Image: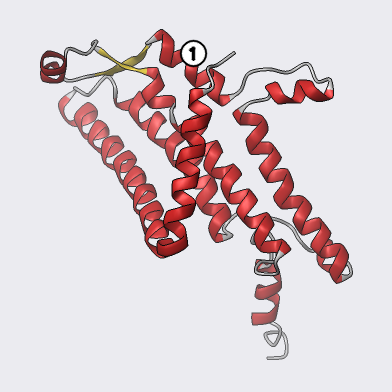
């Protein structure tokens, strides 16, 4: 079973995030957007440079593919919470919008709750044993094993001067690359809980952006008349 200290660190991060957002929510949003933009730009630049090196100079960097794969995973796992916060996740709401307001609100709350449970279960499923489930492990347990083992990545290596100056091993440790697993899921759980509270208090309708079709029909309702 993983040590408990990673859970306390994640909880501390979420508490600090909550305190900062109470005063500077726009600043946090811009920071999240900048992180996602940097990750996307890095993937693009590395991939482009690798193509030029391979086909133009018959050379290349051995760790490029692994690094872009890690950056892509970071962008997805970090972007999940941002998409939930800003209502960018697509969904189908045609059926529940035909329901009475009270029933619609129940389904909206249920959607936010399932998002929270999804993130919490992926973080650690040990607690499900309370309900008789034969489950254990999760993102925290998985990350903690790599942290204690100190196993390196396959192709991604530190520059020689970094190895000499700081005395680190040749390969970048896997726990550094995989730290986004618990952090990303913790952020997703936080945003799901935030969405649940916003729906409960009437500040938000749904956790998804499922009204695009309705807006499209409204914008083009007079097209056939012409």
On the image, which quarter does residue 91 sit in? Answer: bottom right
**Dividing the picture into quarters, in which one does residue 97 lie?**
bottom right
Q: Which residue extends farthest bottom?
A: 226
Percent position of residue 148, x then y: 42, 11
Q: How is the image coloured?
A: secondary structure
Q: Can residue 43 be seen at all in this image of the molecule?
A: yes
Is residue 194 toward the left or the right of residue 43 in the image? right
Q: Position of residue 90 (x, y in %)?
A: 64, 55
Judge from the rendering whether residue 197 lies leftward or rightward of residue 168; answer left or right. right
Q: Residues within 10 Å of mark 1 (few under 14, many from 20)?
A: some
Q: How many numbered discs, if any?
A: 1
Please state, as top left, top right, bottom left or bottom right, where the C terminus lies in the image.
Answer: bottom right
Could you tell whether 185 is left or right of 126 in the image? left
Foreground of the two, 70 or 219: 70
221 shown above or below 207? below
**Horizontal arrangement in the rendering, residue 21 relative to residue 38 (left or right):** right
Q: Quadrant of the N terminus?
A: top right
Which residue is labeled 1 in the image? 145
Q: Is residue 153 above or below residue 95?
A: above
**Residue in the image at 54% along x and 22% along y:** 4
**Residue found at x 52% / y 38%:** 11
Q: Position of residue 118 (x, y in %)?
A: 68, 37
Closest to the observer: 136 or 91? 136
When the figure is inspected, residue 17 is found, relative to residue 128, above or below; the finding is: below
- The local secondary structure at tag 1 comes to helix
Q: Residue at x 60, y 43 (%)?
A: 189
The residue lying at 61 percent from left, 23 percent from top is 138
Q: Quadrant of residue 89?
A: bottom right
The answer to whether residue 207 is visible is: no
> x, y percentage for residue 197?
67, 58
């Amino acid at each position: 079973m993983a040590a408990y200290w990673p859970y306390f660190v994640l909880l501390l991060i979420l508490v600090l995030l909550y305190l900062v957002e109470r005063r500077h929510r726009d600043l946090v949003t811009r920071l999240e957007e900048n992180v996602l933009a940097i990750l996307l730009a890095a993937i693009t630049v590395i991939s482009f440079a690798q193509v030029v090196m391979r086909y133009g100079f018959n050379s290349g960097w051995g760790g490029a593919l692994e690094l872009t794969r890690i950056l892509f995973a970071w962008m997805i796992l970090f972007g999940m919470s941002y998409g939930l916060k800003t209502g960018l996740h697509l969904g189908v709401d045609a059926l529940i919008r035909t329901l009475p307001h009270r029933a619609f609100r129940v389904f909206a709350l249920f959607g936010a709750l399932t998002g929270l449970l999804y993130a919490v279960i992926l973080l650690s499923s040990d607690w499900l044993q309370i309900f008789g489930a034969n489950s254990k492990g999760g993102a925290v347990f998985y990350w903690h094993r790599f942290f204690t083992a100190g196993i390196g990545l396959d192709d991604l290596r530190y520059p020689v001067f970094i190895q000499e100056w700081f005395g680190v091993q040749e390969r970048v440790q896997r726990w550094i690359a995989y730290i986004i697993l618990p952090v990303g899921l913790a952020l997703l759980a936080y945003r799901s809980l935030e969405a649940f509270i916003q729906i409960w208090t009437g500040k938000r309708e749904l956790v998804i952006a499922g009204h695009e079709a309705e807006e499209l029909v409204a914008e083009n309702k007079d097209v056939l008349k012409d």
